[in-house]
Image (cartoon, rainbow, N blue to C red):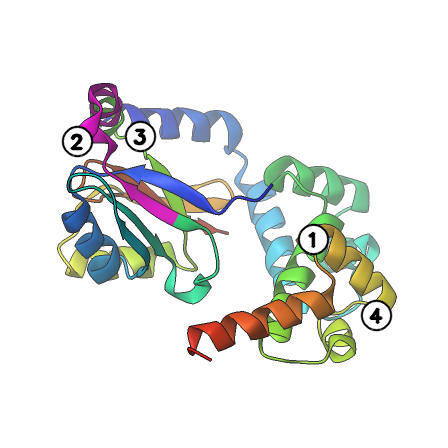
Amino acid sequence: MNYYQTEINRIRRICYSNDKQLKTVIAIRNFIDNNFDQELNLDILSRTHFTSKYHLLRLFKRYYGLTPKQYLTIKRIDESKKCLTKGMKVSDTCYRVGFGTPSSFSTLFKRKIGLSPTSFEKEQLSQCESAAGL
Amino acid sequence: MKVKVVSIPVQNQERALTFYTEIVGFVKKHDVPLSENNRWLTVVAKEEQEGVEVLLEPSPENFEPAKTYQKALFDTGIPHTQFNVNDVQKEYERLINLGVTFSLKPTEMGTVKIAVFDDTCGNNIQLVEML
């Protein structure tokens, strides 16, 4: 066993020995991945996973380094990038990935990506055209 | 300020290009001749060709401390960098079938699954799947 493997085992013993907690947070993340386009909040997540919302919030942050809401936003923004790259309209993209209003979607998108959804879409289109030699 | 390029030190650029394109599945992005036989050689993920470029940097051939550092990391099994995949087990099986050697088989580590392979250019590379 090399040094890295020894360290992996040591860190796993220290940080990841609670299987029940791990199963819970992994199930919550999978639930978010599969339902990001629906209305999701701590109440819904805690009800579906039979745990208190404050415990859920602490666990998720402890294992993923993010709150469930932060993770959900990242997931929705990632999915919106896929939709915009395929040429979907900004307003359709907004509702497709679960955002409530185009303005909240545009604000969050610009904060996370550094471009408005419209500018991002134009940039993707221009990259496709240059890749095709147009 | 943006992150556009990260580098991997390689012992031989041509061999590295073959490994990273034909085995790993990346795509060549830039290949610019520089001094002697050195090139500004970058590859990108096939499904993210406008994403971060990986520079296959010939530093171990040209700079002794880089060679020493690379060898020390390699000998202890520490990955030089890591790439994200959707399914570590599937990628492990695909690479094993192509003759790639793994120093760490797919292993769960809390909320991720990891595996470490030898890139044949002096580095350990880690695959990561978020669970």
Q: Position of residue B117 (x, y in %)?
A: 24, 44
Query: Residue A127: which disc?
Result: none
Residue placed under numbered mark 1 in the picture: A114
Cα separation between marks 1 and 3: 34 Å
Mark 4 vs mark 3, foreground winner is: 4
* Residue A68, visible in the rendered structure: no
Q: Check residue B14 for magenta coloring.
A: no
Report whether mark 1 lies on the same chain as mark 4. Answer: yes
Cα separation between marks 2 and 4: 53 Å
Report whether mark 2 lies on the same chain as mark 4. Answer: no
The reply to whether discs 4 and 3 touch (Cβ–Cβ < 8 Å) is no
Task: Tell me the element at label 2.
Answer: helix
Task: Tell me the element at label 1.
Answer: loop
Residue placed under numbered mark 3 in the picture: B78
The reply to whether discs 2 and 4 touch (Cβ–Cβ < 8 Å) is no
Residue placed under numbered mark 2 in the picture: B61
Count neighbours of disc 2 (C-alpha within 10 A) and say few if under 14, some if 14 to 19, many if 20 or more: some
Q: Chain of mark 3?
A: B
Residue placed under numbered mark 4 in the picture: A102
Cα separation between marks 1 and 4: 17 Å
Which residue appears at 72% of the width and 70% of the height?
Answer: A118
Q: Is residue B85 above or below residue A14?
A: below
The reply to whether discs 1 and 2 touch (Cβ–Cβ < 8 Å) is no
Which residue appears at 13% of the width and 55% of the height?
Answer: B99
Residue type, numbered disc 2? Glu
Q: Of the two numbered discs 1 and 4 on the same chain, state the one appearing first in sequence.
A: 4
Q: Which residues are magenta?
A: B54-70
